[in-house]
Amino acid sequence: MSENMNNEVEPTRRDLGLEAVTSKPVVNDGPASFTTQLLGFWVTFRTMFKKVNTVSYPEVKEPTAPRFHGRHQLNRHPDGLEKCIGCELCAWACPADAIYVEGESNTEEHRMSPGERFGKVYQINYLRCIFCGLCIEACPTRALTMTNEYELADDSRSKLIFEKEDLLAPLRQGMLAPPHAMYPGMDDSNYYKGDVLGFHPSQETSSEVKHD
Amino acid sequence: MTTAQLLGQDPGWLIAVKGVLVFALCVVLTLLSVWGERRIVARMQMRLGPNRVGPFGLVQALADGVKLALKEDLIPAAADKIVFVIAPIISATACFMSFAVIPMSGPVTLVGHKTAMQLTDLPVGVLYILAIASIGVYGIVLAGWSSGSTYPLLGGLRSSAQVISYEVAMGLSLVAVFIYSGSMSTSEIVAAQQKWWFAVVLFPSFVIYAISMVGETNRAPFDLAEAEGELVGGFHTEYSSLKFALFFLAEYVNIVAVSALATTLFLGGYHALPGLGFTEQWLGGWFTLIWFFAKVIFFFFIFVWLRGTLPRMRYDQFMKFGWKVLIPVSLFWIMVVATLRVMSLNGASRVTVLGFASVVVLIVLGINVAFDSVKKRARILPEDNFDAPTFAVPQMPGAESAQLGEPRV
């Protein structure tokens, strides 16, 4: 102890009590035996007769994962009115600045969505989109979702800016092409609660009136 | 009639035809082997490989060749222009030339002439192949040097060092063949294997040749000259278009050439597998051509298999292996073979030969055991023999927590 003090300025490992640490000796067996190394040849040889992983893509298309992030879709309410209210939250959420939205007010003569506003212009630029899905998380009305469609390649920039009509979900059974009035006796809250299950005959006429 | 006499009767036009055939064969084999290699390696990695161009993707290599030819032919400003152009030509020419002395079939009849599918038969045929292979190295080293750039220079140096050192081992492994066959002529070596293939009789030589032929052709796991991670493309980094295609061609023709040489020297050349000798008369002797190429393809498969299985060696390991293992083992084996040969030629009794062989085996085993024990001792690390650091160090995994004592003043 006094010896240490005389000879060394800094405390040694022993002084610090580090000798108490039990360490395992490093085991180094060297290279594997020759026969073990030869096993690698068997691995590659055997693999030749296994089924290949390749998907012959354009001819064979494998289904994507169920929640694959593909092309976007603008959904509709069951009576055909659009869910998009033109709030632009998707555009604000977008980290790649790929979405452009212009909203406009619904009127009695021209109603595209329940409630006050609808999206008049809706563009997604697929040259910028990174398919992160933040727009989907941001959407308050579940208007914007993603499909599993991934074949988006095209040969010009303008073709890759998708307009509203490219993104809108198709009209299904029981849906009526907007603009038309809301379901009689229902307001926008009913729409969001899912009370509207299809269109009402009176809505059809409202649409026809508008067309004339 | 020996093959040399048979070939001596060839009229001029037949020699020309065979020359063209050999050239065409090399080019077609290159295209097929590029395709074959990519398909086989792909299978080993559970992929399909090229299957788009032509049936089963067979024309892929040709399409790639056409693409290469249409590319811009760049010559770097710093390059030595003349040497830069000559280098790939040397490489490609040399590899074609070695095919001239490979006997590809037994006696056959070609347009009414009795001949053999072999361009010429030199009394020093194998030596000629070694010489031509050495000339091929000039292509590589000149390409590396004339590019006027660092990576190609290093790649060229590596490559030439590699080819030259493995040529030594290769040449030594061939000596045993010469001793046993009593000739350096390829056709006579084939004839000497009528009864037993040299791959069986001279198994160590065969193994050494098989290893060194991979080193000689700069192929995986010995493709250090093209180690992408270290040297970009090695000696052909600066090459583009047809000049690059020539190097590519040279590499694959070289593979086929060394495979053909291996077939000739160790696997009985164009002869059938043991017990199938009757097939050699089929199709008027032409069936031997099939045997020959079956064996060449077997070697080619080994090449591809190696590439699919083994990682690239480190350069120093590679050179160490060549100089410290292959060459000494080769030399030792040649001494043994020569002694056995002299004993049997001088009519030594079977007991003496066997006695000598068993003494040799015992010596080899002894050396092996001694080596192993030395290695094992070297591997056991002395415990706590290092200088303990004077500072606190992170805890070892699995160690109990250490109490740091009060720092002493």
Image: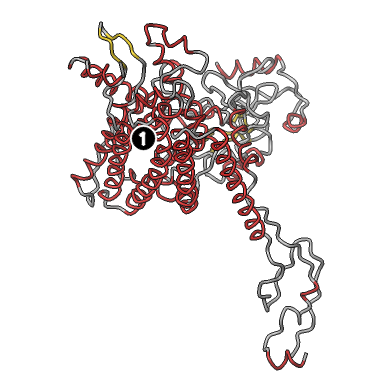
Residue A3 located left or right of residue A63 = right
Determine which residue is flagged by label 1: B251
The picture quadrant where one finds residue B18 is top left
- Name the residue located 65 percent from the left edge and 35 percent from the top edge: A116
Q: Nearer the viewer, residue A207 or B75?
A: B75
Q: Is residue B141 above or below residue A163?
A: below
Identify the secondary structure beneath mark 1. helix
Q: Residue at x 36, y 35 (%)?
A: B251
Image location (x, y in percent) of residue B366: 62, 50
Q: Position of residue A23 (x, y in %)?
A: 76, 65
**For the point 44% across and 24% down, which residue is it?**
B193
Residue B197, given in percent of the width and then of the height, sits at 48, 26
* One can see residue A204 in this view: yes
Name the one closer to the observer, B358 or A138.
B358
| B282 w.r.t. B62: above or below | above
Which residue is painted at 39% across and 32% down in the image?
Answer: B258
Would you say B36 lies left or right of A63 here? left
Q: Amino acid at mark 1?
A: Glu
Quadrant in the picture for residue A108: top right
